[in-house]
Image (cartoon, rainbow, N blue to C red):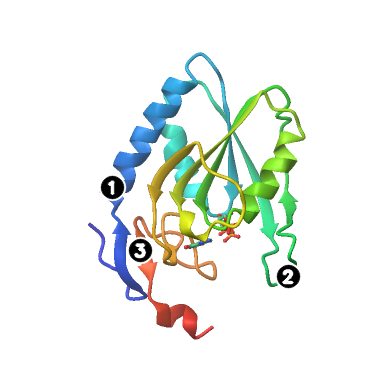
Amino acid sequence: MSTLHPDLEKVLLTEEELKARVAQLGEEISRDYAGKEPVLVAILRGSYVFMADLSRALDILCRVDFMSVSSYGASATSSGQVNIIKDLSDSIEGRDVIVVEDILDTGNTLHYLFQILQARHPASLKLCVLLDKPSRRTKPISADYVGFTVPDEFVVGYGLDYNEHYRNLPYIGVLKREVYAKD
Ligand code: PRP
Ligand code: 7HP
């Protein structure tokens, strides 16, 4: 058990809880995609830790690919449009695609991204998120696989950041309000 980072209020999900749930998700996805060869598409940067662990929890053939997008939230534009910074390396036409994300919050990013990916005619398109914060949703999107449903608190660790920090914490914790209130 790691010691609590001083900027955090509490641990929300321990390393052990994360490991156990990712293993379960891996079993579920392996069962659902038995005999297929899905492409796991990780949306950088937040999903890099989850992707590494989830992909290793699968016991079926799979591919991995990566995409990076910039979200223009409500402060920049009301459209919730996202721009592609780094596109996929391979075509997804005719492939079974599973988008792997760290968190589904308002849904802006993934709602827009799904329109982009659907237009590329994958055989199927599903969403796997480690964390779901349904209380914040403004777009009609839900995940096919959810690791944990979390309350409306700002969480970091296991890939999730605040100002590019804390991604490397092995657990997920709630950031102290004073840390982001001063910015
Ligand atoms: C986070 C996360 C999702 C998005 C979720 O990405 O990885 O992509 O926010 O929020 P939404 O549902 O309200 O759109 P962020 O823009 O923080 O980039 P990062 O992955 O590089 O941390
Ligand atoms: C994005 C994001 N990044 C880190 N922690 C959270 O709670 C977040 N919600 N949306």
| Residue at the spot 55% in from the left edge and 56% down from the top edge | 137
Give the x, y percent position of residue 135: 47, 59
Amino acid found under the numbered disc labelled 2: Ala
Please identify the quarter of the rendering in which residue 38 is found.
top right
Mark 1 sits near ligand 2, with its Cβ under 8 Å away: no
Mark 2 sits near ligand 1, with its Cβ under 8 Å away: no
Q: Quadrant of ligand 1?
A: bottom right
Q: What number is the disc on residue 105?
A: none
Instruction: Give the distance between the C-alpha atoms of the residues marked 3 and 2, in whole angstroms.
Output: 28 Å
> The C terminus lies in which quarter of the figure?
bottom right
Number of numbered discs: 3
Please identify the quarter of the rendering in which residue 22 is found.
top left
Q: What number is the disc on residue 173?
A: 3
Q: Is residue 9 above or below residue 100?
A: below
Amino acid found under the numbered disc labelled 1: Glu
Q: Is residue 145 above or below residue 10?
A: above
Give the x, y percent position of residue 176: 38, 76
Q: Which element carries disc 3, helix, strand or loop?
A: strand
Amino acid found under the numbered disc labelled 3: Gly
Q: Is residue 23 above or below residue 72?
A: above
Q: Is residue 118 above or below residue 31?
A: below
> The N terminus lies in which quarter of the figure?
bottom left
Q: Residues within 10 Å of mark 1 (few under 14, many from 20)?
A: some
> For mark 1, what is the residue?
17
Name of the residue lying farthest toward the left: 1
Instruction: Give the distance between the C-alpha atoms of the residues marked 2 and 1, in whole angstroms.
Output: 36 Å
Instruction: Give the distance between the C-alpha atoms of the residues marked 3 and 1, in whole angstroms.
Output: 12 Å
Please tell me which of labels 3 and 2 falls first in the chain: 2
Give the x, y percent position of residue 74: 68, 68
